[in-house]
Image (cartoon, grey):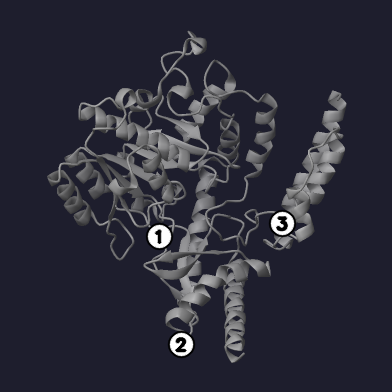
Amino acid sequence: MTSDDFRHAAHTAADLVADHLAELPARPVWQPMPEAARQALLDAPLPADGRPLTELLAAVGRDVLPYPMGNGHPRFFGWVNSAPAPAGVLATLAAAAMNPSSAGGDHADVHLERAVVRWIAELVGFPHPAGGGLLTSGTSMATIVCLAAARNRAARAAGWDVRADGLAGMPPLVGYVTGETHSCVRKAAELLGLGSRYLRTVATGPDGRLDVADLRAAIARDRAAGLLPFLVVASAGTVGTGAVDAFEPIADLCAEERLWLHVDGAYGAFGVLDPVIAHRYAGMERADSLALDPHKWLGVPVDCGCALVRDPAELRAAFSLVPSYLRDEAAGELGWFSEYGTEQTRPFRALKVWATIAHRGRTGLTEDLARCTALARRLGELIDADPELELLAEVQTSIVAFRYRAPELSGPDLEAVNRELPLAVQRRGRAFLTGARLADREILRACLLNPRTTDPDLHLLLTEIKSAAHELRRSTTAGRHH
C-alpha cells in the first residue's frame, strides 16, 4: 500500500463519515436490524486473503453505518449516551495514526493527558495537584481506581497492608451508597474484595438525595458492631432522575468520621458549568475522589472516563509497580500513568478530549450544557401540563423521570404499559427513550445530552409516547377479548 493509496482511502472515509453525520437527523433514530444484515455480521468468515481499503470502506458504508445505536440523533433520549463531538471524531484518526502506549515516557500523548486531566478538573472546580488523576475507559474503571485508593488508605490506617497480605483476617470495610447509586460502584466493591454485603444502602429523601441523618445512624451502627466504615459514595446526577446529592453536609460528616468521600459524577458532574444549576454542586470539590465521563455530556467519542483524586500519593500507593524493564530515568517525579491505575498499555485518549474541549472552549461547553438542562426543564413542563403523563421527580439536571397514565389504568396494567413503552417507542423509529424502576414503579426516563435537540423534538417525543401507549392498550384489550 502506497501513501497515495492511504490518502485516497482516508478522503473516502472522511466523506463516508461526513455523509453519515449529516444524514442522521432525517433518518429513523433506531430500527431493529434486518435478520439478513444481522446474520451477515455474526457469520462473517475469517478472510483467507486481504481486500483493498476501498472495498473495506464500501463494506462499512453498506453493512455497519446504516445500523447505528441511535445516539447521534437529536431525538435520542435514552440512557446517557451522547452524540460524538466532530472535533473528537477527527482527533481519533490522528491518535490512531500515532498509536502510542500512553503509559509513560516523554512523548506528546503523555504530556497532553496531564494537561487535559487538569482541564477537566478546572471545568468542574475540583482541586488538581500534579498527578491527581488519569483518563480511563470510563467511570466504571475510574471507580475501581478511586475505590482501590480508598480501600488501601483505610486498611493502612487500621495497620493492614492490603497489597502484601490481602483482606483475609481484616475487619470488614464498610461503604455507604443509596438505592440510586450506579451499579459500577457495587461491581468495584465486589472486584476489590470488599463484598457487596458491606455496601450499605442509605435512605434518600423525597428529592432523591442521600439522607445524611440516616447515613450518620448507619455509620454509628457499624462502628458499634466492630466494623470499619471507610467510604461514602455521593452522586452528582443519579442514574434514574439526575438528582445531585447535598455535598456539603456529606463532606462534613466524612471529615468528622474520617471517611473517604467519593463522588460519582459520570454523567452529571459537568452540570456544574451551567450557572442555573451550579448551586446544586456546592461542596463537590471537597470529595477525596471524583469519577466522571468526558464521553458523556462533553461528547468525547467513546471510550473516555476520568478519575480525579485529591491526593495523588494514594493512587501510587495502591497501584505503583515498576519492574526493571520499565525503569525510565526520564519519567520525572510523577512517574508513569501506569503507576496510578490498572492499565499498562494505555490508548491515546487525550487527543480527542483536547480537541473536543479546545474546539468549544469553556464558553461553548457551558452553552451546550445549559441548553440541555433548559430543554429538560421544558420537557418537565410539557409533561406536567399533559393529563396523560405524570412527572415523577424534580428535573435537577438533564434527566426527566415520568410515566404514562390514564384514568382507567391502574395497578399491574399501568405498570405493564410503562414497562413496555420504551421498546414500543424505539421500534417506531421517530424517537428513542428508555425505562427504569424508581421507588418500585416502572418509569420512563428521558436524558437530554444533545444540544442540537429542539423544542419540536420534545413535542414529537411525547406524541410518540402517547401514540405507542394507545397501541399497547388496544392490543392488550384485543388480547383479553380473545
Disc 2 versus disc 1: nearer the observer: 2
In the rendered structure, which amino acid carries the disc numbered 3? Answer: Leu
Residue wearing tag 1: 396
**Residue drawn at point x = 79 percent, y = 58 percent:** 36
Give the residue furthest to the front: 169
Whether 92 is drawn above or below 344: the answer is below
In the rendered structure, which amino acid carries the disc numbered 1? Answer: Gln
Q: Name the spot of residue 408 as percent of width and height, x first.
A: 47, 89
Q: Name the spot of residue 33 as percent of width and height, x first.
A: 72, 59
Disc 2 versus disc 3: nearer the observer: 2
Q: Earlier in the sequence, mark 1 or mark 3?
A: 3
State the quadrant of the N terminus.
top right
Within 10 Å of disc 1 (Cα), the crowding (few <14, some 14-19, many 20+) is many
Tell me the SS state at disc 2.
Answer: loop
Q: Earlier in the sequence, mark 2 or mark 1?
A: 1
Whether 201 is drawn above or below 330: the answer is below
Tell me the SS state at disc 3.
Answer: helix
Residue wearing tag 3: 24
- For the residues labelled 2 and 3, the Cα–Cα distance comes to 38 Å
Give the residue furthest to the left: 224
**Residue drawn at point x = 25 percent, y = 33 percent:** 154
- For the residues labelled 1 and 3, the Cα–Cα distance comes to 29 Å
Decide if residue 210 is on the left or right side of residue 62.
left
**Residue drawn at point x = 59 percent, y = 39 percent:** 356
Residue wearing tag 2: 407
- For the residues labelled 2 and 1, the Cα–Cα distance comes to 28 Å
Q: Name the spot of residue 161 as percent of width and height, x first.
A: 27, 25
In this view, the residue in front, 169 or 271, is 169
In the rendered structure, which amino acid carries the disc numbered 2? Answer: Pro
